[in-house]
Image (cartoon, rainbow, N blue to C red):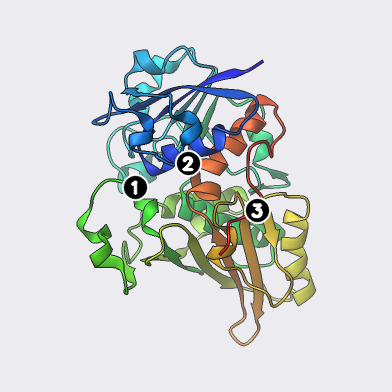
Amino acid sequence: MTLSVAVSGASGYAGGEILRLLADHPDVQVRTVTAHSSAGQPLVAHQPHLRSLAHLELKPTTPEVLAGHDVVFLALPHGQSAQYTDALADTPLVIDAGADHRLTSPDDWAEFYGGAHPEPWAYGVPELPVGRRKQRELLRGAARIAAPGCNASTVALSLAPGIAAGVIEPGDIVSVLAVGPSGAGKSAKTNLLASEILGTANPYAVGGTHRHIPEIRQALAAAGTPAAGIRISFTPVLVPMARGILATSSAPIREGVSDAEIRAAWEQAYADEPFVELLPEGVFPRTADVLGANVASLGLAIDRAANRVVVVAAVDNLVKGTAGAAVQSMNIALGLAETTALPLNGVAP
């Protein structure tokens, strides 16, 4: 049985990447693509690389257009997805690539986003430790899924094994991320112009203001510690690469924990995961190595002089960080093979 799919926000980066993955999925057919100001135009006018979907025309993003499909992906700006929830009540599976349904805390939503707090949905990071289980167990059969924020899932995957195993202290986490501008979306913004980002690195949302911070705390709390006990200093830096995140995260080592116990925590957490790899000791990832792949690549160091564990993680923010996580979660929810249509290999050079 082939499932019918609609993708909203199909003219944007996240929507385009979801479509690129779905185009090669044997169990689905992309039937409808929607946009706002671009409605009425051919999809390939905005996504010229999606040649196999050249027959599709962008339709208006309305509940009526999105209804009647087996699966709907909402790749809309933050704050716009929740308005469609009630209208899509009869849709078997809805996956939101925006932030609307990620946060479980009304207080966090009010502080970082504002407005009415939408209903939280199952969180779309299958590999994330949740106590003694993985998040994928909560995705099986799910009807509503919130795909993660790319920065948030990268940091969470970096440190959750250490928290779940009790080998690191969660009260003094520091994460600094080099991120590409595609994570900010496709809308024209002065600070994202080529003349503004080429040849420079620009920090933003400094001092605990980034909207992914409560999502990180929430994801790490699920690994096995109260959210109140998680303190994180999170600093993203915009760098001149279209795609990619390189996150360097560190946390104190718990007293009495050995080097072998530390590395074992990450090895055991991800040993059987097809899309999260722990590199050999002394080896660290590059963003170039995960370009186009649905892979989070991790390198781990133990800094005894500072008594901290350091994890360097590389992801393609549009694949494993967003669209790949959404499609992977769809596969799990529908009982399909989890790896279907998801690239393991990257693109080089």
Q: Which residue lies at the image location 42% right of the left edge and 14% below the top edge? A: 67
The residue under label 3 is 345
The residue under label 1 is 185
User: Considering the image in quadrants, where does the N terminus appear?
Assistant: top right
Amino acid type, residue under disc 3 in the picture: Asn
Q: Residue 314 placed where, x, y %? A: 56, 62
Q: Residue 272 placed where, x, y %? A: 78, 50
Looking at the image, do the residues carrying marks 1 and 3 touch, with CB atoms under 8 Å apart? no
Q: Is residue 285 above or below residue 106?
A: below
| Closest to the observer, 160 or 272 | 272
Element assignment for label 3: loop
Inspect this view and state whether residue 103 appears.
no
Query: Callout 2 environment at 10 Å: few (<14), some (14 to 19), or many (20+)?
Result: many
Q: Which residue lies at the image location 74% right of the left edge and 69% below the top edge? A: 263
Q: Residue 296 placed where, x, y %? A: 61, 56
Amino acid type, residue under disc 1 in the picture: Gly
The residue under label 2 is 17
